[in-house]
Image (cartoon, grey):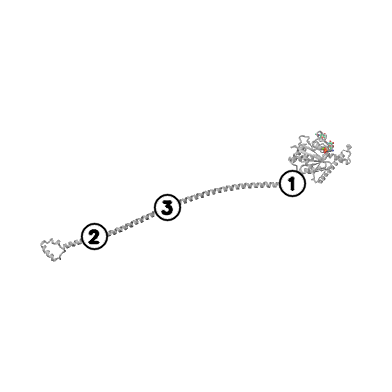
């Protein structure tokens, strides 16, 4: 209302205004009432405030509760979070442990692997060494095998060589058996040494033996071969039956000649088997044997010829006393020795005929005897003591020359064969007589 305006209308108007106011206006509130009202309003407001406070308190309480709950929840969340963190940590630790375990495992595995690798490497190395050893062993075995093969081949070669030699030896023996050219009994070394000792054998000398029956002219031939006449000093005794009783040794009268001559006394009729006679006499020691035959062959002559052949010793058949036989033939042909000068030419002619006859008859006869004795044919040398001596000495007069038959041939063959048989080179023909 106008409280503010009234204040401006002086007092008069004051009243008037009052009245008018009073009239014109409803009546206002009672202050007391207002006061009461106010007090009541305050009261109500207080109450309202209290109520609001209570609500606020309640709300605050509720909020607090909620906060508490929230806090609780937060705590729980915290706890949960912590638990989760712990779990996470545990899990992390577990992972870490697992990692460590895995690491350890890996380490172990690595070590095992390393060990296995090492093991494998050592095994491989050992295997390699073993392989090397085996290789070396194989090489050694190869070498030994090669050696053995070579030895076997050498042995086979030697065996083959020996077999060949044995075959050859057998073939030779077979041949010799077929041909009958092998001693019945081969003398032992002791036998040979004994025989050499008995005959006074000397290395470097040629040893020639002359065999034949008593009176066949052995001593005379040896004398002639030695360059001696029967009556010369140093000559072998001749002319007496059974003069020579045992093997007699005669060095050559010329010291330049490397010859030794032997007189083998005739055994007459063989009382022992022929090979026993030959071996007992030690005839296998000689370089050559001369079988001196006079009118006929004896069993001893044949034994010497046969066994000399079996021993491979040259053996010469010599018919002695050609001069005497020719002279006898001449007489049979009518020649009288009390000849005269004018008969000289006819005598020479007769002698020539008689000699030719004697030579051919003797050769024919000897071959027949050899055939009869189952011996191969061989030459017979027909000689006389005087012509033999001339041939030996190289002093052949024209008169002697007419009477030469086989003397030079005999000398040449006897000495030449002996020389060749000892490994000498064959000399120029005829030269062998020059050394006499
Ligand atoms: N006319 C001639 N007579 C010979 C010949 N050879 C030897 N005579 C003689 O025949 C005989 C016997 O000769 P030897 O030389 O003693 O005979 P041997 O074989 O030695 O005799 P034994 O020693 O008894 O075995 C002797 O009277 C010799 O002179 C020869 O060629 N011509
Ligand atoms: C040969 O023998 C005969 C007969 O016995 C003899 O007279 C002669 O002297 C001998 N000749 C030689 C060279 O010995
Ligand atoms: C050769 O022989 C003859 C007679 O036969 C003899 O007179 C002569 O002295 C001999 N010569 C030699 C060198 O022996
Ligand atoms: Mg004699």
Residue 356 placement (x, y as % from top left) = 84, 42
341 vs 94, left or right, is right
Foreground mark, 1 or 2?
Answer: 2
Quarter of the figure that contains the N terminus: bottom left
Residue 50 numbered tag: 2
Determine the quadrant in which ligand 1 lies.
top right
Q: Earlier in the sequence, mark 1 or mark 2?
A: 2
Foreground mark, 1 or 3?
Answer: 3
Residue 90 in view here: yes
Camera-nearest residue between 62 and 111 = 62
Residue 173 numbered tag: 1
Seen in the picture, residue 51 relative to 389 is either above or below; the reply is below
What element does badge 2 sit on? helix
Q: Earlier in the sequence, mark 1 or mark 3?
A: 3
Do callouts 1 and 2 mark residues in contact (Cβ within 8 Å)?
no
In space, the residues marked 1 and 2 are separated at their CA atoms by 169 Å
The residue located at (71%, 47%) in the rendering is: 166
What element does badge 1 sit on? helix
Sort mark 1 into few (<14), some (14-19) or many (20+) by Cα contacts within 10 Å: some
Q: Earlier in the sequence, mark 3 or mark 2?
A: 2
Quarter of the figure that contains the C terminus: top right
In space, the residues marked 1 and 3 are separated at their CA atoms by 106 Å
The residue located at (63%, 47%) in the rendering is: 148
Camera-nearest residue between 35 and 390 = 35
What element does badge 3 sit on? helix
Residue 274 placement (x, y as % from top left) = 79, 43
Camera-nearest residue between 427 and 258 = 258
The residue located at (13%, 65%) in the rendering is: 22
Q: Answer with the quarter of the image where residue 20 lies.
A: bottom left
User: How many numbered discs?
Assistant: 3
The residue located at (58%, 47%) in the rendering is: 137
The residue where tag 3 is placed is 97
């Amino acid at each position: 209302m106008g409280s503010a305006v009234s204040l401006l209308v002086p007092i008069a108007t004051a009243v008037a205004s009052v009245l008018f106011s009073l009239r014109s206006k409803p009546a206002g509130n009672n202050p007391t009432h207002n006061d009461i009202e106010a007090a009541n309003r305050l009261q109500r407001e207080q109450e309202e405030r209290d109520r609001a406070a209570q609500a606020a308190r309640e709300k605050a309480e509720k909020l607090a509760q909620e906060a508490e709950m929230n806090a609780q929840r937060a705590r729980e969340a915290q706890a949960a979070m912590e638990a989760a963190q712990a779990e996470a940590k545990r899990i992390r630790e577990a992972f870490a442990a697992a990692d460590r375990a895995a690491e350890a495992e890996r380490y172990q595995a690595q070590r095992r692997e390393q060990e296995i690798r090492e093991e494998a490497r050592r095994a491989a190395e050992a295997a390699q060494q073993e392989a090397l050893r085996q290789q070396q062993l194989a090489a050694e075995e190869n070498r030994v095998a090669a050696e053995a093969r070579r030895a076997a081949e050498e042995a086979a070669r030697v065996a083959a060589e020996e077999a060949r030699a044995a075959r050859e030896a057998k073939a030779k023996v077979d041949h010799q058996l077929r041909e009958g050219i092998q001693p019945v009994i081969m003398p032992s070394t002791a036998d040979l040494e004994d025989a050499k000792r008995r005959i006074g054998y000397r290395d470097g000398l040629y040893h020639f033996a002359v065999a034949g029956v008593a009176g066949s002219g052995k001593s005379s031939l040896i004398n002639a071969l030695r360059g001696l006449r029967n009556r010369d000093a140093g000559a072998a005794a001749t002319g007496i039956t059974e003069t020579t009783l045992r093997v007699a040794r005669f060095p050559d009268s010329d010291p330049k000649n490397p010859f030794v001559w032997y007189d083998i006394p005739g055994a007459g009729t063989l009382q022992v088997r022929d090979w026993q006679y030959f071996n007992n006499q030690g005839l296998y020691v000689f370089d050559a044997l001369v079988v001196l035959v006079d009118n006929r062959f004896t069993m001893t002559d044949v034994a010497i010829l046969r066994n000399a052949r079996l021993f491979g010793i040259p053996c010469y058949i010599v018919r002695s006393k050609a001069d005497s036989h020719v002279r006898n033939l001449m007489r049979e042909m009518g020649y009288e020795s009390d000849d005269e000068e004018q008969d000289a030419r006819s005598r020479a002619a007769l002698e020539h005929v008689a000699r030719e006859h004697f030579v051919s008859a003797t050769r024919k006869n000897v071959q027949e005897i050899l055939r009869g004795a189952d011996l191969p044919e061989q030459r017979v040398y027909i000689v006389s003591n005087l012509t033999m001596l001339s041939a030996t000495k190289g002093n052949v007069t024209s008169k002697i020359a007419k009477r030469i038959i086989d003397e030079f041939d005999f000398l040449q063959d006897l000495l030449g064969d002996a020389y060749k048989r000892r490994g000498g080179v064959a000399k120029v023909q005829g030269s062998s007589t020059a050394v006499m």
